[in-house]
Image (spheres, grey):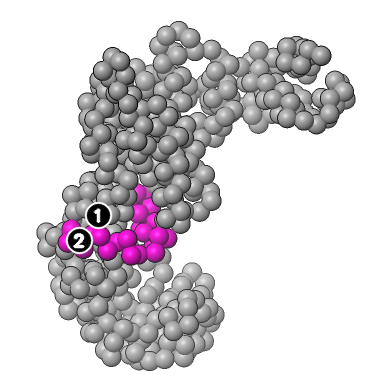
Amino acid sequence: MQINTNFIPKTPKTYLVGGTVRDMILGLTPKDYDLVTLEDPRQTAARIAESIKGRVIELGKPGKSVFRIITRGLSLDITPASGASIEEDLGKRDFTVNGMAASLSSGRFIDLFDGVRDLKNKTIRMISPDNLRADPIRLLRAYRLAACLNFSIDRKTCQSIAAESSLISTTAGERVRDELLKLLASSDSHHFVSMMNNTGLLAAIFPELSALKECSQNTYHQYNAFEHTMQAVYYLEKLLHSPESLISSNHFLKDLQPEENCWPLLKYSVLLHDIGKPQKRSVGKDGRAHFYNHESAGAEMTKKINRRLRLSKRQNAYVDFIIRHHLKPLALFTAFQKNRLSQKAISRFFLKCNNLSIDLFTHAIADICGKGITDNASAFIEFADQIGKAYTTSFFPLTNRPQLLNGDDLIREFGLSPSPLFSKILRHVEEERISQTISTRDEALASVKKFINLHNPS
């Protein structure tokens, strides 16, 4: 095996390693290039940077520094070798496909653990169980790599993951978050999340999911709460990555999807959307199970999980909104089935959910398909198609137009002082406009007058 190292100056005792070598063998372009050196990494980085006219940035904590060389179109990360030789360094790595190296000075290719064979066989195989224990994030990384490369994980590695799954709780939350969201970005993450359930790793990361396995549901569901959750993740993945498998080509909804950078977070939200059910389960006089307010309870539980995994404020807000409001599309559908759905109710939903309206309906399609009752799912998809069309053709164009009235108008025309009533009035005007009850400034003023007389007759 020959690895091209000619784009980096020949440097003694320095090697291309790990995922960089793996990706080059697979014909992929690495996002950055990882090197280890047996020399002083600061001096090595300085020599290489000078040769390729780059600059060096020191990253990380003292004693664990990474020296990043940045030049046009190229990023190189240099770290000290872990051990006295390159062989010792490679022996401490996670998986055989990441345990290969190429010498910058001689071009010699080093593959001590048959990484090339495992790449050909599309297999993720650990170098040693001790290596998984040494850094437990590797337990999750096995699934992330397998998902991203479309590989399988060998049996002994799965057994070691099962034996050590509890160790994932000792890993920094942000590292778990990063690996998990990368896994969920793949088009077949459902399969690997199911495998994580089989080895106990899923429950080790999300112990809150375990109670769902004992949570039976009502006649609207074919599965228990955990089985339903896994089905919902499966259907969401189909909706996002191959919508034509669920939505016919003549449907408007087929080409209307959430922003792609939100897909991993939407899958994460579906995975956790029902965790509030066990604590909110009750049985009514009719003998049926009910889960009143489970969406609010689940959102609060998820906030704690998000803190544990160090999600950003933006990520937390997105997940919280999806879980807290995931029943709203189903409530609209129920009203529609009973001939009680008004245009104002749809407008109110759009104004409340705005650009997340499509995300919520995508979530809801996966949720209802995950119940296992096909007829209801087909009817809901038809309904969601109508809502998607209304969002794109009516709501979205109107929101890009100037408001009919603002706060200054309320002060000038009605002598009002700024108060909480302001936002209620302006929201009312927007609801009327979005539902196309009004379209001009004069109509808006007349609507406000009527609203004030109704809500504040004095």
The residue wearing badge 2 is 161
Q: Is residue 182 left or right of residue 421?
A: left
> Residue at (54%, 35%) from the top-left corner?
355
What amino acid type is highlighted by mark number 2?
Answer: Ile
Q: In the image, is residue 69 above or below residue 252?
A: below
Task: Give the secondary structure at mark 2.
Answer: helix
Circles 1, 2 touching at the beta carbon (< 8 Å): yes
Pick the residue in front: 254 or 132: 132
Main SS class of the magenta portion in the image: helix
Which residues, given as a range, are shown in magenta? 162-188
The residue wearing badge 1 is 201
Q: Give x and y (percent) for residue 324.
A: 46, 35
Quadrant of the image for the C terminus?
top right
Quadrant of the image for the N terminus?
bottom left
Q: Give x and y (percent) for residue 19.
A: 31, 69
Q: Earlier in the sequence, mark 1 or mark 2?
A: 2
Total marks in image: 2
Measured in 3D between alpha carbons, the distance from the residue under mark 1 to the one under mark 2, in whole angstroms, is 7 Å
